[in-house]
Amino acid sequence: MAPFKTCSLCGESWVSRDDLLADPEVVLLGYQAFSANPAEGMLLFNHMTCQTTLAVRVESLRDLHDGPVHAESLHGTEACPGRCDTTGDLERCTNRCAGAWVREVLQTVKAWPKTPRG
């Protein structure tokens, strides 16, 4: 079985998504948005062991959100606070926007309990 993610610099790998999120050496940096389809955006993590950035498609974490997913994107409108335009902005977006579910996934990932590997 292929690992969920392998570090491109040091080769460390995580068997599952949960292993990656629980690793204290993996720190959430932000969300690199793809406004045409928020599910294709990337969550960015820093692998503290080797200081490499890891990218994980947000679609692979979609099941961490069990609330509504809105059809219309408000990106670029007056109603949009621009959170998805700032990679390091990890806050919620309360708009009824197609990308709001990603902001909720960020909250879940931020709060994920860290457990030392081994």
Image (spheres, grey):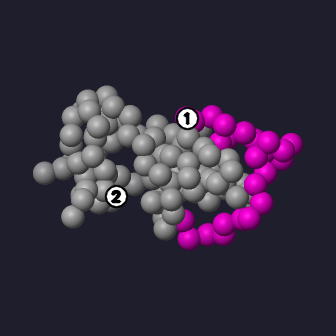
Visible residue check, residue 7: yes
Q: Residue at x 51, y 40 (%)?
A: 30
Label 2 element class: helix
Residue 11 found in image quarter: top left
Q: Is residue 82 magenta?
A: yes
Residue stretch rendered in magenta on the structure: 65-88
At 21% from the left and 64% from the top, the residue drawn is: 1
Crowd rating for badge 2 (residues with CA inside 10 Å; few <14, some 14–19, many 20+): some
Q: Residue at x 38, y 34 (%)?
A: 53
Q: Quarter of the image holding residue 85?
A: top right
> Which residue is at a point 74% across and 65% down the rendered structure image?
71
* Residue type beneath disc 2: Arg
User: Most prominent secondary structure in the magenta stretch?
Assistant: loop
Helix, strand or loop status at disc 1:
loop
Report the label total: 2
**Nearer-the-camera pick, 15 or 118:** 15
How far from the left and from the top, in percent, is residue 64?
Answer: 48, 64
On the image, the x and y values in percent for residue 118 come to 13, 51
Residue matched to label 1? 88
Q: Is residue 71 magenta?
A: yes
- The Cα–Cα distance between marks 2 and 1, rounded to whole angstroms, is 21 Å
Of marks 2 and 1, which one's residue comes earlier in the chain?
2
In the rendered structure, which amino acid carries the disc numbered 1? Gly
Horizontal arrangement in the rendering, residue 52 relative to residue 91 (left or right): left
What is the x, y in percent for residue 18?
32, 59
Q: Which mark is residue 17?
A: 2
